[in-house]
Amino acid sequence: MQTVRDAPAYPVPDYGLRVLHALEDASFEAWVVGGWVRDALLGAPMHDIDVTTSAPWQETERVLRAAGIEVHETGTAHGTVTAVIDGQPVEVTTYRVEGTYSDRRHPDEVRFVRDVREDLARRDFTVNAMAYHPDRGLLDLFGGREDLARGLVRAVGDPYRRFEEDALRVLRAVRFACRLGFEVEPRTQAALVACAPELDDIARERVGQEMDGVVASGRVSWALRNEFAVLARAVPALMPMRGLDQRSPYHAYDLLEHTARVCAGVEAFAGGVPTQALRWAALLHDAGKPMCASVDENGRGHFRDHQRAGAVLCKDALLGLALPHEVAGRAAALVRYHDRHLSASPAGVRRLLRRLDQARPGEAPTLAYQLLDLQRADAIAKARPYAQRAVELGAFEQALSAELLHGAAFRVRDLAVGGGDVMRELGIAPGPEVGNALSALLDDVIYGRVENSREALLAWLREKE
């Protein structure tokens, strides 16, 4: 059971009170609704303030402006304006009910009403369908407070109707369960599974926003085990993972359970704050395996080049969800090298840094540490004899830190000589030959064949000539 208060753990902030008081002074009713009420009852960090009111939006705008409050028309078709007080936005929406949703996303009709109870009945989940007023207290018509206490996400009314109205609610239910650490109520869960295919009709950008929230919650491992039908509709690359027997002595779990364990592992190794790219890389690190799977004559499974295939698939999946290009690129680089053997020798460290820099220029050191977390998580999700690799990677981390501390050369610009030096020493004109010579010098420095000093590199050039 969750610890849930009878009243919010903190008062409505002054900027919210100003909106309530202005509307009520003009003889309209107003309540605080939505996430602020839910989180305040849980004692969680404060959510943005949303207000619902009996005032038509035109009256809301007039009243608030008369009270000296800045107002913007942000969604008047749905009765919404946004007040801004001391830099804080407060969305104010007229009580409303909605008609059918022929596109499973937007109501065909919005009708404004005078009763807050009708407005609350149209909302998605009981924990989001409560209203609060500092004087009138909590208005909870659908058992939202009880569901908070029981740790349940439950649809308001008929869950099938709620999800048919707006198919994105299917994924939003999973996001709330992940974010709050809740379970999904059984009847709502059955509707989630039944309605998950309707996510195919939702714009991928909107699916990406919700799915990114699931990943950012740090509980995507729970979602993979409990809400796979929904996640696989949101990210089709996950679909072939279920039940894939890896047929390998390295693995004790099928591909889906292995992935869930890796997702949980990166949370642990990154101290609960993995980057967005690392979390997505953990989710999709082995997504290339199904397409690369083969079984030899001894019945052993192989997944040759799955890292490269997975990197392409990962990038395509994230861009398809309209996630930022830099996140997709970083995640793909981590997937590409997640299974690479990391040698703790100076040359091994520099080689990895060079490859990561080629994939994501300027980001190699940061990505190298993230790759360590991914590889450790991957190791502990394998069969017990191979989990020891997570400990062995500590030697690579020490070597990586030492190389970076001493200014490891892994890019041409890190060399103590430049193109002009090469042209003078070799007597060549500007052109590809200069770049080739610098690249060869970098190879020699990376492998420790020559010291990265101006004198040593110039001597090395003359000797090679």
Image: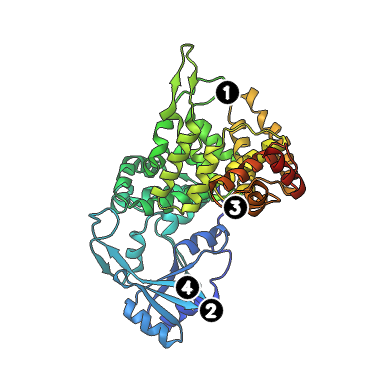
Q: Position of residue 367 (x, y in %)?
A: 60, 46
Q: CA distance from mark 4 to mark 3?
A: 37 Å
Please state which of the two labelled residues, at mark 2 or mark 1, is closer to the viewer: 1
Question: 10 or 451: which is nearer to us?
Answer: 451
Q: Judge the density around disc 4: few (<14), some (14-19), many (≥20) Cα neighbours within 10 Å.
A: some
Give the amino acid at mark 1: Tyr
Amino acid type indicated by mark 3 = Gly
Q: Quadrant of the C terminus?
A: top right
Q: Is residue 341 left or right of residue 416?
A: left
Q: Which residue is mark 3?
A: 362
Please identify the quarter of the rendering in which residue 379 is found: top right
Camera-nearest label, 1 or 4: 1
Q: Is residue 312 in sight in this rendering? A: yes
Q: Name the residue carrying label 1.
A: 250
Return the residue nearer the eye: 361 or 274: 361
Q: Which residue is mark 2?
A: 86
Task: Tell me: 57 left or right of 12.
Answer: left
| Helix, strand or loop status at disc 3 | loop
Which badge, 2 or 1, comes first in the chain's sequence?
2
Where is 317 relative to 15, above or below?
above
Q: CA distance from mark 1 to mark 4?
A: 53 Å
Mark nearer the N terminus (1 vs 3): 1
